[in-house]
Amino acid sequence: MASRREAEKLISAGRVSVNGRVIMELGAKADPDSTTIAVDGKPVDLRPKTIYVLLNKPKGYTSTRRDPHAARVVVDLVKGIEAPLYPVGRLDVDTEGLIILTNDGDFSFKMTHPKHNIPKTYRAEVRGKVTQEELRRLSTGIMLNDGITAPARAILSALNTVRQVSIVEITIREGRKRQVRRMMDAINHSVIKLTRTRFGNLSIGRLKSGEWRFLTQKEVHFLLDMASKTK
């Protein structure tokens, strides 16, 4: 409810009490689990506020909170939130699109653990003409250096025969490092541009690159319900 400096002013003014007794000593200690801390007689809610943000990540941002080797990190794009936010999973620095940021560690675990199989959809613009046989291979499983991929959903959504470029929409339920790029490389179609368009029931919607919004309570509950059904 206040910064440390403002909290010290409240204490010095005699406005803070612990179990009904006014505390004016700066640095006095109290156990929030066994005491009632109040300001002006009103109990302070000490439960941490959980925050969930949906960001349309631009290319060139690293999916981490801090990285001394990264020029830019995704949390730099979310202004005005004091709580420390962390990315739910990762998007490659060159990959764009939907990523969730939160301070809820349990939620993040459920969204990223392999046993929960949350579906993630990507729009991959690749070189060359992708054939139906190659789509079938993507759908049934591709052998990578870390094992065969799980069944996926892959459809050809556009084809430019002049530019010799295909656009493939692919939905996976795993989260291996650079998985979609490696799957495309395995069928000899290098990725030109990769965008994550959906995560579970969420989509980018009208968010422009670099824009963000809070998730609704309904959206959070839907994702948690989806995770609980795929144990």
Image (cartoon, helix red, strand yellow):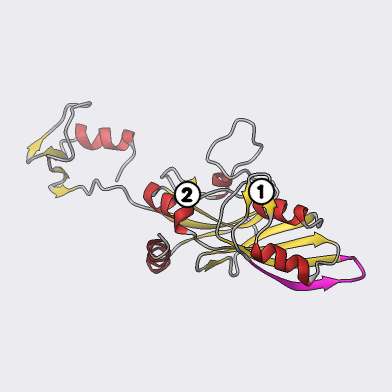
- Precedes in sequence: disc 2 or disc 1: 2
Give above or below for 24 relative to 189. above
Secondary structure under badge 1? Answer: loop
Q: Which residues are magenta?
A: 153-164
* Residue 151, quarter of the rendered image: bottom right
Q: Is residue 128 above or below residue 37?
A: below
Coordinates of residue 87 in the picture (x, y in percent): 51, 48
2 vs 1, front mark: 1
Q: Which residue is mark 2?
A: 80
Q: Pointer 1: what residue?
A: 178
| Residue located 42% across and 44% down the image | 82
Against 74, residue 197 (above or below) is: below
Query: Disc 2 to disc 1, how far (Cα)?
Result: 31 Å
Q: Nearer the viewer, residue 3 or 29?
A: 29
Indicate the position of residue 202 as horizontal and vertical percent values.
52, 66
Q: Is 161 in the magenta?
A: yes
- The secondary structure that dominates the magenta segment is strand
Q: Is residue 26 left or right of residue 159?
A: left
Magenta region includes residue 68: no
Q: How many marks?
A: 2
Q: Residues within 10 Å of mark 2 (few under 14, many from 20)?
A: few
Q: Amino acid at mark 1?
A: Arg
170 vs 31, left or right, is right
Q: Identity of the amino acid at label 2?
A: Gly
**Residue at x-position 32% and y-position 34%:** 4
Image coords of residue 201 (percent x, y): 50, 68
**Left or right: 32, with 95 as reference point:** left
SS at circle 2: loop
Residue that appears at 62% across and 55% down: 149
Q: Quadrant of the C terminus?
A: bottom left
Left or right of residue 3: residue 20? left
